[in-house]
Amino acid sequence: MRRLLIAGSWILGALLIATVFAAVRMNAFLHTPVAANEEGTVFEIESGATFRSVSDALAAKSIISHPVMFRAYARWLGQASEIQAGDYRIRQGTTPVQLLEQFTSGDVQLYSFTIIEGWNQWELLDALHQDVNIEASLTEEDWPAVLDELKAATHHPEGLFLPETYRIPRGTSDRALLKQAFDLMQTVLREEWAGRDEALPIKTPYEALTLASIIEKETARVDERARISGVFVRRLGKRMRLQTDPTVIYGIGKAFNGNLTRKNLQTDTPYNTYTRHGLPPTPIAMPGRAAIHAALHPAEGEELYFVATGLGDGSHAFSATKAEHDAAVTEYLKRLRRQRQQGN
């Protein structure tokens, strides 16, 4: 009996020592940083992946040293089934404890997608299709259905999606990104409309988007947006035609070859502001917040005309009278001729 007690004590002691040793090893493993590059190591968890396959993949990439311990820890916490699919950037200093938290919280790597000011619907769709991080499936024929889903008041996409840089996880659908851009545009438009100047000839937020889209296409210069807005607002107030080339080009559509002719200016379309009064029926591009702000806060003055200077800096010459404008146009054409002669 004494021998059995002694043997049992030895066994219990050995088990205790083994348990303590295992606990020490587990603790050391869980709080020792994993292997990661200086800029961070990107690791993908595929949809439907098991925790065993994830831990084995981490070990195969030499990110963790003990996949069995990692699995045991996750199962002990009951989190082995809670990992989320996606790309994860594992940064230097991350421990297995933090890594499991990252995987279960869905703290995935985000990628940038930028909608550029002045894009039209075709350029937006093309960019969505070209981005490898976006699940893109939409075509031009899908716009009405998409806009119905967004509860938009129009089936015309231009002007509805705010130019901005969006941070998205890989695999984001084009519809999900467009919803973000649509919702953000609605927020911005509400804010800008609420703070608009009084006595504008712009009667609805949608008209503001339309004018903003024209301003966006006319200039990229911060110092000119409000002045160009002032010209258009004064012309609208005087019942003068806007006579802006970007609307004519938009009305031509995909058939436009880059050369705007006199015939184009004389051919009537719903978007030809040389042949029709007032704003075109819809926006012609995606305006940014600055252009929307300019549309609703036009600069004061007497200017009714503007033309490019041809100086290469995107600037325009502004005029209050037709005679001044004609002189500015003549100077612009002279400058173009000189530049062509110097280029030959």
Image (cartoon, grey):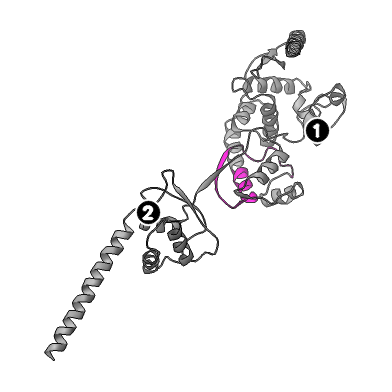
Q: Quadrant of residue 322?
A: top right
Does residue 81 appear in this view? no
Q: Dot 1 corresponds to which residue?
A: 251
- Mark number displayed over residue 205: none
At label 1, which amino acid type do we have? Gly
Q: Secondary structure at mark 1?
A: helix
Between 179 and 122, the residue placed more toward the observer is: 122
Q: Total of numbered circles in the picture?
A: 2
Residue positioned most to the bottom: 1
The magenta span reads 155-183
Vertical side of 328 occupied by 148: above or below: below
Question: Would residue 8 appear left or right of 61 to someone viewing this image?
Answer: left
The picture places residue 135, in percent across and down from the top left corner, at 64, 52
The quadrant of the rendering that contains the C terminus is top right
| Category of crowding for the residue at label 2, using alpha-carbon neighbours closer than 10 angstroms: few (below 14), some (14–19), many (at least 20) | many
The picture places residue 242, in percent across and down from the top left corner, at 76, 23
Does residue 281 appear in this view? yes
Residue 156 part of the magenta-drawn span? yes
Q: Secondary structure at mark 2?
A: loop
